[in-house]
Image (cartoon, rainbow, N blue to C red):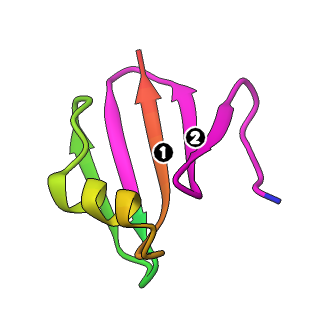
Amino acid sequence: SLPLPADALAFTVCQTPVIYTRGDSATLRVTYADGTVETVAGAQLPREASRHILARDNLVRSLHVTVI
């Protein structure tokens, strides 16, 4: 199971957990299987992260989306 903060929404895309929360700014946080975290301002997923998710190669552990 995946622990979620209060008022969060979660689902999976190509077996990758996607967690939506509300915040002060729109950001994407990509957590990779090796533990590194890439944070991006805005709502555009980095191309490489998108490729890994769609390939289902398990290199992206989760995606956390913060919306305003």
Q: Residue 67, image x and y in percent? A: 42, 22
Q: Quadrant of residue 44?
A: top left
Which residue type does callout 2 highlight? Answer: Ile
Q: Residue 24, image x and y in percent? A: 39, 20
Vertical relation: 16 (above or below) 66 = below
First-in-chain label (2 vs 1): 2
Q: Where residue 64 is drawn, which disc sits there?
A: 1
Q: Which residues are magenta?
A: 2-30
Tags 2 and 1 in contact by the CB under 8 Å rule?
A: yes
Q: Is residue 65 left or right of residue 11?
A: left
Vertical relation: 66 (above or below) 34 = above
What residue is at 45 percent from the left and 67 percent from the top? 56
What residue is at 59 percent from the left and 58 percent from the top? 15
Front position in the image: 68 or 34: 34
Front position in the image: 23 or 2: 2
Secondary structure found at label 1: strand
Vertical relation: 1 (above or below) 35 = above
Residue ranking furthest to the bottom: 34
Q: Quadrant of residue 21?
A: top right
Front position in the image: 24 or 60: 60
Q: Where residue 19 is drawn, which disc sits there?
A: 2
